[in-house]
Image (cartoon, coloured by chain):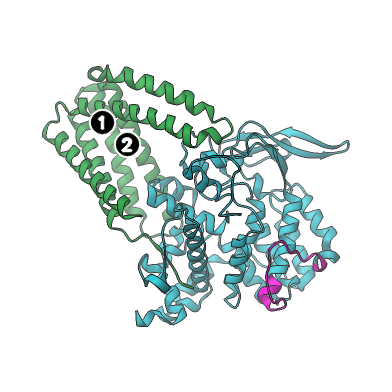
Amino acid sequence: MSKFQRVRSFLAGLGLILLALILLISPESGIIIVAAIISFSMLFYGFRTLWFYATMARHMVGGKSFLYQGIIVLDIALFTIGLIQMSKFLIMIYLMGVYAFSGAIDILRALEAKKNGSPSWNMKLISGCIRVAATIALFIIGIFFRESSVLIYGYCINLGYAAVMRFINAFRRTAIVYIQ
Amino acid sequence: MNKDFHCYATYCAAILAGFSHEESAAIGYSSQMVDLCTRTMLTKLHGPLSAATTQLQLELMDARTDIIGLQDITRIWASFHFLPGDLYADPGKKCSKKYLNKYRLICNPNSDLLEKTVRLAKDKSLQAAGLAMHVLADTWAHRYFAGTPSLVINNTNYHFYEFIQGENGETTRKVNFRHSPSAPDEPEISAYTNTVSYNKEKSIMNLGHGRAGHLPDYCFAKYKYLPAWAEYEEIVKDNPKDYFNAFCQMIYALKFLHGDISSFEHSHYDTEAVKPYEDDIRRILNTTQLDSTADWRELGKRLSGYELNEIDVAKLEKEYTDAEEDKKDDTFLGRFFIAAMNQKSMVTNQIYKSGNKLAGYSIDFKTKGFKGIRDFRKLLDKKGGGKNE
């Protein structure tokens, strides 16, 4: 990693921690903040797809699909920004999907590591089970009781984890040594 | 390529190059070990994690796709399975630096990097020779794909046909790709498993030849398709022909490593040594079967008089774990780990020196001293310089 990338990784970690703190302080309006983040991310993604087409995909067989995709995503993003207040339910579904998928992957990795005799399988299994259990809990709490603050706390944990990973990356040794 | 070629064909090539049965077996097993040495295995053995030469499917699914994760993936796959054909290649059109960097990682045989790979193994262990043979063989099998996750380079589409030899000559049949990893490939109906189409440039689904399934790994396969990078120009990939070249080139390279030839240059093939067995080898390569181990093993027995057993990974692991700390590097796996780190270090350095950061940063010890991942200190210790640092 270059020095610039390290600084960027560190600042991104700080940004994520800040966001998690804001959500923790005000969980009631948190879901709207999360909805806004996701909607603006979609807007950013639309622009990024167009940029990807211009710099990369135009050289690729079938690359024009990115041009259309970018335009459509931009359109949807602008539409959802207008509906931020009403998108609570969709956000819940999205967050549950993320938890369930990452939990399933952790469990599969743990089982594979165990099969290969690796000693580090139990932590992965526990983390996978917690994520799957969290998904079920969020499903019950979110869908039946319409309680969104638990979702926010779960989202904060994810943000915290992402921030820690960025801090670690910023200070990690990554260069390969070449010895002639 | 699968274990049939990487282990058993490599064994045959080593015998034909003049190595003994025991030496050839070590070379064959080391070549196969490249497909087995994962981080999961290294964690279990408490070995250097930087010596990983491959990644399990779930390791890949779990891998981070941030910059560090991508550089790590690229180092592993470009160093051992998709050796870049030309790090200074020009696509012949105006394009962004980002695109150019990916384009320059496309694997192809007979490159300067291949020469460096084989020369790096000279006067080193048999494990280093085996590892170099894996890299060499894969340059033929995996050509036209890059060892980095990239949609714009590695994607394929519906235009994918297999050539079928029939009574009326050669015909083509559309390949039916499926996405279930547990479903076996069925060459008799051209049904193969590939990775799902995923429109993300850096998705792990777009690593190497995932989108073409295992077709590049089958010696009998001859097919044509539209690679994402070739401006709608069809590519015909003739595996039996390419694998034959790989076999002849391995003999030439192994003769160099054995000391019978003074230099190794690319685009040289030892067809003379193969001549008495050419019909047998071509028959094996042209037979439609998912695993040709039995045929190569039989040829190996004819060549050496010995039958090559399956690699006993548990035995090798036990030898490594039972060895005293200062003797670990002298075990089979210890030597393999050193060879793997040497190769990874060299390829990363070459990619970095070409101005391409996709495989990460390389620090030349000679000018900058030891800065970077600590695992590589092993290489320094091997050179006798580690103690003074």
Tag 1 and tag 2 share a subunit: yes
Residue at the spot 55% in from the left edge and 46% down from the top edge: B103
* Residue A144 horizontal/vertical position (percent): 24, 22
Give, as a single range, the part of the protein colored magenta: B254-273
In this orientation, which residue lies closer to the viewer: B318 or A70? A70
Q: Which chain is green?
A: A
Determine the image quadrant of residue A49: top left
Determine whether A74 is above or below B203 in the image: above
Whether tag 1 and tag 2 are in contact, CB under 8 A, the answer is yes
Mark 2: secondary structure: helix
* Residue B389 horizontal/vertical position (percent): 34, 79
- Residue located beneath label 1 in the image: A138
Q: Colour of chain B?
A: cyan
Mark 1: secondary structure: helix
The reply to whether the magenta stretch includes residue B288 is: no
Q: Label 1: chain?
A: A
Residue at the spot 63% in from the left edge and 55% down from the top edge: B139
Q: Label 2: chain?
A: A
Distance Cα–Cα, label 1 vs label 2: 10 Å
